[in-house]
């Protein structure tokens, strides 16, 4: 991925050039922009890659107008804008123009390095279903009660789809009031959230969506839950329907993490979903709550064939056997995930996918089976340790 630098100050130009080289990215050009010079002539030949752009206050509005037109036909160009103005108003205006990230001046070296790494690995969003008859598969996860590990299971299955099955995947965290999926997929390293999209729902398009997605890997995008209650409360079921429709057109798989309480928003997602995983444990309180949840879903007309029961932290000697659980809840168990905290705790505490911490264990095996089941395919055979070592060394 080529990198371009345009700066209005020689000192900043040298700083940005040095950061690009230290990040081991190919530097295509570094141009010094005199005050008053129009931006568009400097953009000739820049169609894809990363553009680091400094815009002085007197030219900022003009530059954003130029970028909005320029970037509309260049979805593979990631623009990182540097400005002394870090206000929310400028952030919104920059996002509408197609800017991927707004960075302060002077840029903190560590933040700049993280941004370069994030956007150099970012997913290029290309509508996969422009000519397809149906949108991407949507898989919803809902816990029968709190603490069942629903977000952990959903996040790790999304990671497996992207990393091992090589499918473009979006993970949407719709647990709006307590969503923590962003921590399971990169320690919460995301600047924009779902609420940044829904505030501008009438302007929603692929460009705006792209500016709010956090690229966890080249194949996996995260749309994080809002960071405050006020923003979460302002999101409607209609907003979610529009967002998910666009997300499904731009990815091959969409995973949605739902809150345990049924409301207008979650019911809209459940209606749109192709598969619904109900996550529980094999103990008495979970069985009681799962029975109630399944009964409510049936009464609301949820299609029986898309409901799948997943028992997480399964204990063979637990309070409730699988046969009694199935009989009480009224659904067959599609998958069990064993309870092995020694493998899971490190991933939970470090904010990494389980496979990045410990790729070969019983929990990963069960997660791979579940992912293969929902994709209707066999899980790819894990690479030998020598192959992984050679890949990392390269």
Image (tube, grey):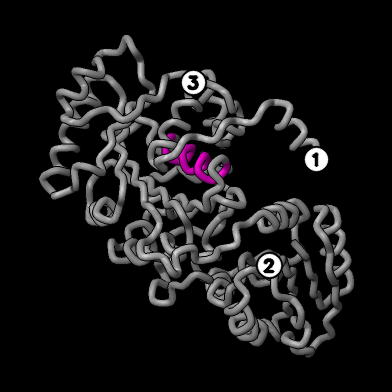
Gap between marks 2 and 1 measured at Cα = 28 Å
Q: In this rendering, would 215 be left or right of 209?
A: right
Residue 291 location in percent, x, y?
17, 31
- State the residue in front, 196 or 40: 40
Task: Say whether marks 1 and 3 touch (CB < 8 Å).
Answer: no
What range is drawn magenta here?
Answer: 153-163
> Which quarter of the picture shows residue 268?
bottom left
Looking at the image, which residue is at 58% across and 53% down?
215
Q: Which circle marks residue 362 in the picture?
A: 3
Q: Report whether 342 appears left or right of 336.
A: right
Q: Residues within 10 Å of mark 2 (few under 14, many from 20)?
A: many
Q: Which residue is mark 2?
A: 80
Q: Quadrant of the N terminus?
A: bottom right
Q: Is residue 182 magenta?
A: no
Residue 178 falls in which quadrant of the image? top left
At x 19% / y 18%, what residue is drawn?
Answer: 324
Q: Nearer the viewer, mark 2 or mark 1?
A: 1
39 w.r.t. 332: above or below: below
Q: CA distance from mark 1 to mark 3?
A: 29 Å
**Residue 341: % across, % down:** 48, 20
At a point 41% along the width and 65% down the height, the residue shown is: 132
* Kind of element beneath mark 3: helix
**Res. 394 mark:** 1
């Amino acid at each position: 991925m080529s990198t371009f630098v345009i700066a209005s100050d020689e000192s900043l130009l040298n700083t940005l050039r040095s950061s690009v080289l230290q990040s081991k990215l190919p530097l295509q050009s570094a141009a010094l922009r005199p005050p008053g010079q129009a931006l568009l002539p400097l953009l000739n030949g820049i169609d894809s890659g990363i553009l680091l752009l400094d815009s002085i206050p007197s030219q900022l509005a003009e530059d954003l107008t130029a970028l909005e037109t320029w970037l509309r036909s260049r979805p593979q160009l990631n623009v990182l804008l540097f400005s002394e103005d870090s206000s929310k108003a400028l952030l919104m205006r920059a996002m509408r123009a197609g800017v991927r990230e707004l960075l302060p001046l002077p840029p903190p070296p560590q933040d700049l390095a993280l941004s370069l790494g994030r956007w150099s690995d970012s997913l290029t969003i290309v509508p996969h279903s422009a000519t397809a008859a149906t949108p991407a598969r949507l898989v919803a996860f809902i816990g029968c009660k709190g603490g069942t590990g629903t977000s952990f299971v959903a996040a790790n299955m999304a990671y497996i789809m992207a990393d091992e099955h090589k499918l473009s995947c979006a993970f949407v965290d719709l647990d709006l009031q307590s969503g923590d999926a962003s921590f399971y997929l990169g320690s919460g390293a995301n600047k924009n959230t779902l609420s940044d999209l829904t505030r501008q729902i009438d302007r929603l398009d692929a460009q705006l969506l792209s500016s709010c997605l956090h690229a966890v890997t080249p194949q996996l995008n995260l749309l994080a839950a809002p960071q405050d209650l006020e923003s979460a409360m302002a999101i409607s079921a209609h907003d979610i329907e529009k967002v998910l429709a666009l997300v499904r057109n731009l990815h091959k798989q969409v995973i949605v993490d739902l809150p345990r309480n049924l409301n207008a928003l979650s019911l809209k997602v459940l209606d749109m979903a192709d598969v619904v995983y109900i996550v529980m444990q094999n103990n008495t309180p979970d069985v009681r709550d799962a029975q109630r949840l399944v009964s409510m879903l049936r009464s609301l007309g949820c299609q029986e064939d898309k409901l799948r029961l997943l028992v997480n932290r399964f204990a063979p000697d637990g309070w409730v056997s699988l046969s009694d659980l199935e009989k009480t809840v009224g659904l067959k168990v599609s998958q069990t995930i064993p309870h092995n905290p020694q493998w899971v705790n490190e991933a939970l505490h470090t904010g990494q996918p389980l496979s990045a911490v410990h790729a070969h264990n019983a929990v990963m095996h069960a997660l791979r089976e579940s992912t293969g089941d929902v994709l209707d395919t066999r899980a790819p055979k894990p690479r030998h340790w020598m192959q992984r070592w050679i890949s990392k060394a390269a």
